[in-house]
Image (cartoon, coloured by chain):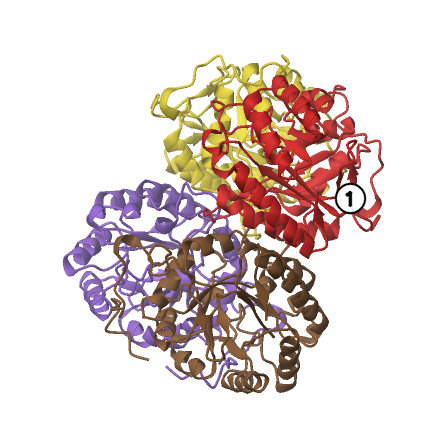
Chain colours: A brown, B red, C yellow, D purple
Amino acid sequence: MSSALDRPQQTSPVSAPPDGTLLSSRELDPTDHVIRLSSGIEIGGREIVLMAGPCAVEDVDQLVLAAETVSAGGARILRGGAYKPRSSPYSFQGLGRRGLLMLRSTADRLGMAMVTEVVAPEDVPLVADYADILQIGARNMANYRLLEEAGRSMRPVLLKRGLGSTIDELLLAAEYVLAQGNPDVALCERGIRTFETAMRFTLDIGAIPILKQRTRLPVVLDPSHAAGAAELVGPLARAGIAAGADALLVEVHPNPREALCDGAQSLGPRQFAQLAKEVGRVAAAVDRRTG
Amino acid sequence: MSSALDRPQQTSPVSAPPDGTLLSSRELDPTDHVIRLSSGIEIGGREIVLMAGPCAVEDVDQLVLAAETVSAGGARILRGGAYKPRSSPYSFQGLGRRGLLMLRSTADRLGMAMVTEVVAPEDVPLVADYADILQIGARNMANYRLLEEAGRSMRPVLLKRGLGSTIDELLLAAEYVLAQGNPDVALCERGIRTFETAMRFTLDIGAIPILKQRTRLPVVLDPSHAAGAAELVGPLARAGIAAGADALLVEVHPNPREALCDGAQSLGPRQFAQLAKEVGRVAAAVDRRTG
Amino acid sequence: MSSALDRPQQTSPVSAPPDGTLLSSRELDPTDHVIRLSSGIEIGGREIVLMAGPCAVEDVDQLVLAAETVSAGGARILRGGAYKPRSSPYSFQGLGRRGLLMLRSTADRLGMAMVTEVVAPEDVPLVADYADILQIGARNMANYRLLEEAGRSMRPVLLKRGLGSTIDELLLAAEYVLAQGNPDVALCERGIRTFETAMRFTLDIGAIPILKQRTRLPVVLDPSHAAGAAELVGPLARAGIAAGADALLVEVHPNPREALCDGAQSLGPRQFAQLAKEVGRVAAAVDRRTG
Amino acid sequence: MSSALDRPQQTSPVSAPPDGTLLSSRELDPTDHVIRLSSGIEIGGREIVLMAGPCAVEDVDQLVLAAETVSAGGARILRGGAYKPRSSPYSFQGLGRRGLLMLRSTADRLGMAMVTEVVAPEDVPLVADYADILQIGARNMANYRLLEEAGRSMRPVLLKRGLGSTIDELLLAAEYVLAQGNPDVALCERGIRTFETAMRFTLDIGAIPILKQRTRLPVVLDPSHAAGAAELVGPLARAGIAAGADALLVEVHPNPREALCDGAQSLGPRQFAQLAKEVGRVAAAVDRRTG
């Protein structure tokens, strides 16, 4: 990672498009941008991609069980947190490098790709060594140094919308990655903060068609964090596919009641299989398919 | 309408359920409540019901054209405003009784049912003479005198969620109708106020499964007011059906560009036919059907 | 009250100002509008007016005690609810006409003016017979028939901002009253719905200077409903006066722990005396004074 | 900066308080915590501290003019951005190390302390060499690696509330600094995202008394970012002091119309002098004083 101290004025390798147009805009290029992973998986093509796995990697047994579950259910990409940004400094913060190793080897054994979160610019090179996709979490959407570093890694980036961020700001955050010459950004809606407390966050379902209209980038839906409760994940996932999402990011745990984080919203094995089946039917109704 | 002056302490014909349970709750009765209209239409059954028509009744030609359009597209219930609650006193306020007559005769000729808004307690008896369903708009969700009067009319009530109201408050507002002994309330999600301005309102898609889980009442989605733009209505409508809504309330105008209100979000005839077709496919994917 | 059935298209006695300007605007007339009550009290002049009293009138003893307390503390206007709009139909709804009588006689005996809420158009003539000021509550801010009827009564109107309503919408709601030829509207900020739940509502303190800049109308702050907790009422009241409010509307109960509604946010006698003293000091610091 | 790769599980030098109590809580210690700077300035004592200066350091002339202006108006701490987190990668990003040097020498010459923002963990040691106080901006409130690094620097930290963050989350973010053994955190309210667009953000004035009640930490108000317009800064600043804030953070520019960022909300020299005078009067009314 190069030192930023002497270059606070960003010198991006890609020149800014004229007149305030964004690099992600359909005005520059109307075609859909498809992210192609080395494993042959495509995000943003006709197939709806399921990314699933535990909130946090806790130990080998939990991860392997979760991965086998989601793979059997049709997930092509394994998700799991090795570095966890937690609201409280006293909460479990993840297994770090050990978690990365476990995620990589588990994904490889099952023929899956792998996505995991990176929380600091200094960690990008290491995480990029292990992961197929770098996730930038909602709390870091406006961590511009992290976005630039992720851009420079040339790994695909899954960028989550901040919980108090507008759609316009999400697109500008994506631009920090794209301006580094990295074209592979997937935009993720995961719920916003509103006055309604019946769900953990309010899923902004309208963001999906708006993002699809304005940008070429694939759009991912995370129904788990918005729901905050397992029984709402299915309806939200179906709604997202019906509205045009290209992929889902779902929390699954072999035994949700024992999860170290986000247990309430994690699906168990049978619930995930059910969700995958239901999502497949809705996908067909909008001329898409699941894997 | 009886005078309220001497009975501010409500004396409802139905006694309150014990322990804070609501009359609408699945705890009292787990079965779905189905609203049966005299025309044989059922809201809350297996069939997804389409309610469609213009924001405001403007004149006979506009209304008849709109009604024929939506009937041909599969709508079973005609919607249209005769009394319009407008933010500004200087905006078009509706045709009043003349509009009611036009709605009733047009619906009858096409074999449709009819829903229209009522904005004041004193108008309830008149509107109930013409309409099959009384709509209480978002701005009047907490107009409790109006809710009581609508309850006493024994007409089915389509109750819209206030744009700053919680799901809990929507259920309590419904209780004002139910407590009058009127069991026929349909709850309508139409978008809430949030910081995001890319859409006119943020559609709270999660409200649909939450309402279905907590209450026995049918749930209606109004994708038009949330969207504020015609091209977003289709994706939101599909999402709503995928999430479990029982009916849709859609604004359609024979010529949206000439509409006196809400033109930007009104569908033209071809757009509505397309929406009805797409919604039918998604309905089938969740084991429902359209008419 | 005239029947609205044949005149849904509003025919206001005052003609609309040109070009979208509002009757309340400083562009039409830059001077402050002062509401003058028959008792010699002025709202919108140099003196900060304190309006205080119980949330709901419960019985004579409670009302008289509360009124004597707030009168001793410097309040010039007695507030109290005879008709209460409650979220649940099973909550206490007020004493109605009996409450109005008690409020009027108590205010007269102490030489105070009196403000109380009206919740339905049909009740306006009766409430206007008793009250010096008609209060339109937050839940009824967009109850346009009620606003028109209040306008026709020619009584001063205290109009509360809806909890999901913008400042622009509050000004348009006021216009419904002004367009009836009634110039005496006071605008009341009482907190809006946001994601923050540490207070009952988020007090939009910025609304006060914005309303003072855009309109000629007096601006009132209700710190009690926003706070939801007695210990926050004082700081919010001081902040409102420092920001330019012309009056305060404060809930006071002789014994808050026994209140039938809003006990948590009601001040007891000693707390109100303390608040009045503190507010007086801040008023002096912005070249105003309390009574 | 130590590498975080092998210690994702935080090992703080301070042990967590029992039972979910926070280190900042008045339950652990009821006294006010006062931050003492080497220059003799105290934040959180009886004196209200004014921190003022330009949004971004643009050049020496602009900075010196702004600093002389705010010093003359009574500001004891110079603020200014050398590293700017901007929504768009194509906006001015600050002068970096050159800006730090200019801020330090200007502050020294005028006998002021200096606060400036740090946006990445790797920059903390450098910024801590120049600044008396490290500012963590709203967009980085949940950048936990940055908070930890700022904690380890042992410099006082001015922590701004995220625009979509709750008061509880602000307190947990502060805990990341405190848990490093650094007791000097000042909490800053700067407005939150709500549906109201009349101001840039909605200033949550109630956060000030709530923070003062729950924590021992000094509370700072930034009226400039919330206002988004110079004419609203004064009323908000007065309101904040009346509500109990210990300090103000105000944007001042020698010529706001030529500012490279935030010109609309920056005060010119005369406006700042006026604000300082008005704030002094309100401070006296709540038994505080300005410098």
**Residue corresponding to mark 1:** B24
- Which of the 4 quarters of the picture holds residue D21? bottom right
What secondary structure is marked by label 1?
Answer: loop
Q: Inspect this view and state whether residue C18 appears.
A: yes
| Amino acid type, residue under disc 1 in the picture | Ser
Please state the chain letter of the residue tagged with numbered disc 1 in the rendered image.
Answer: B
Q: Judge from the rendering whether residue A288 lies leftward or rightward of residue A255; answer left or right.
A: left
Quarter of the image for the N terminus of chain C: give it: top right
Q: Nearer the viewer, residue B106 or C16?
A: B106
Give the residue at x 34% y 68%: D118
A180 w.r.t. D161: above or below: below
Give the residue at x 57% y 21%: B60
Q: Judge from the rendering whether residue C279 lies leftward or rightward of residue B30; answer left or right.
A: left
Position of residue D279 measured from the top left corner of the image (x, y, whole percent): 34, 45
Position of residue B220 measured from the top left corner of the image (x, y, whole percent): 67, 43
Q: Inspect this view and state whether residue C89 appears.
A: no
Position of residue C28 measured from the top left corner of the image (x, y, whole percent): 35, 21
Q: Nearer the viewer, residue C83 or C69?
A: C83
Numbered marks: total: 1
Graded by Cα atoms within 10 Å as few (under 14), some (14 to 19) or many (20 or more), the crowding at tag 1 reads: many
- Which of the 4 quarters of the picture holds residue A261? bottom right
Position of residue C184 measured from the top left corner of the image (x, y, whole percent): 48, 20
Residue found at the very far left of the displayed protein: D61
B31 w.r.t. A118: above or below: above
Q: Nearer the viewer, residue B18 or C95?
A: B18
Give the residue at x 50% y 42%: B230
